[in-house]
Image (cartoon, rainbow, N blue to C red):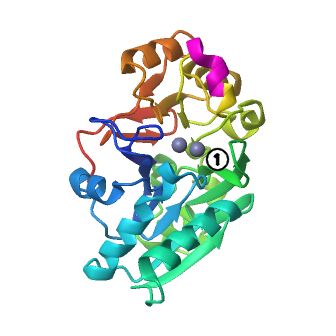
Amino acid sequence: MFEIVFLGTSASAPSVHRGLSAQVVKHDEFRFLIDCGEGTQRQILQSGIGFKRLNRILITHGHLDHILGLAGLLSTFSRWEAIDELEIYAGKWALDRIHDLLFGVVLRGARPPMALRLVEVRPGVIFEDAEFSVSAFPVDHRGSDCYGYLFDEKSRRPFLAEQADALDIPQGPWRRDLVNGQSVTLPDGRHIDPDQVLGPARPGTRLVHVGDTGRTDNLRGVCQSADLLVIEATYLQEEVQMAADFAHLTALQAAELAVQAGVKHLVLTHISRRYRERDVLAEARAVFPQVNVARDFDVFQIKRDELLRPAQSD
Ligand SMILES: [Zn+2]
Ligand SMILES: [Zn+2]
């Protein structure tokens, strides 16, 4: 299961109700901040999620509405928030700009308040743990080296407790080892293989996050059968030409991608204040009913094809 907390959902400039791009994806104790628009640190405070373990930041691209908040965040960390290390992942162009912002403006020769690593993203896996992985994939927007991020839970074979009971396997380490795919020898001398108590593999949850993009045809593969697609919808179809000129999507184009890729749920973000939210929703919903338009502080949990909306984040 992944949880996503939207911190800022506005396109290019903030509005009264929407901050600039930022969201946190969580999996157990791991947290990834995706983009960090101006004002993100205040949104983090207001959301209640806090700064703890917020030590990995994934940047989609180098436009200012996605990175300016890094300056304030680093400044705050240098005063009182104790984080031992901070990793910022971005494509080369964005990373150069972030380097200028942090080392040229914020630090200006001072030592970073923590181990600070700027990591250049290339397509492929950028983080891996026993339970899930995070991969970067290229996205076409203005400027080079723009990336989207795929959060991919590993498939699991469910433990069949009834089967284990029928085989008289005692509680304790034997069951744990079998869950982990290891054969065991029971106290009575019987040998049990994992295949005897594990069901067929069930695929894990897939969450795809796409920031600003002007194309969707190159995203169908990575979005294929995703449980949740989070993607920008800056324009409505009535301004489809302007969307193309600025390399952004309309709500309809985002929804059409969801249909073509067979995704289960769609959440639209990067919303322009030139439109009413309900018009954005209506345009997408006409072709893809399982759609939401994110608001600041919205929390969604995605567990395979089930999208839940807990009252608030833990
Ligand atoms: Zn943007
Ligand atoms: Zn942009």
Left or right of residue 141: residue 287 = left
Answer whether residue 126 is magenta in the image.
Answer: no
Asked if one can make out residue 178 in the rendered structure from this viewpoint, the answer is: yes
**Label 1: element kind:** loop
Vertical side of 212 occupied by 184: above or below: below
User: What amino acid type should be assigned to the residue bearing mark 1?
Assistant: Ala
Q: Residue visible at 27% across and 49% down? A: 313
Quadrant in which the C terminus is drawn: bottom left
User: Mark 1 sits on what residue?
Assistant: 201
**Which one is in front, 272 or 126?**
272
Left or right of residue 140: residue 299 = left
Asked if one can make out residue 229 in the rendered structure from this viewpoint, the answer is: no
Q: Residues within 10 Å of mark 1 (few under 14, many from 20)?
A: few
Vertical side of 65 occupied by 82: above or below: below
Vertical side of 219 occupied by 37: above or below: below
**Percent x, y for residue 9?**
40, 39
**Which one is in front, 84 or 130?**
84
Furthest residue toward top: 286
Vertical side of 54 occupied by 81: above or below: below
Left or right of residue 126: residue 298 = left
Kindly report the secondary structure that dominates the magenta region of the rendered protein: helix
**Percent x, y for residue 261?**
69, 28
**Percent x, y for residue 273?**
39, 28
Q: Residue visible at 63% across and 72% down? A: 119
**Which one is in front, 109 or 58?**
109
Q: Residue visible at 70% across and 22% down? A: 260
**Percent x, y for residue 204?**
58, 47
Numbered range of the magenta stretch: 237-243
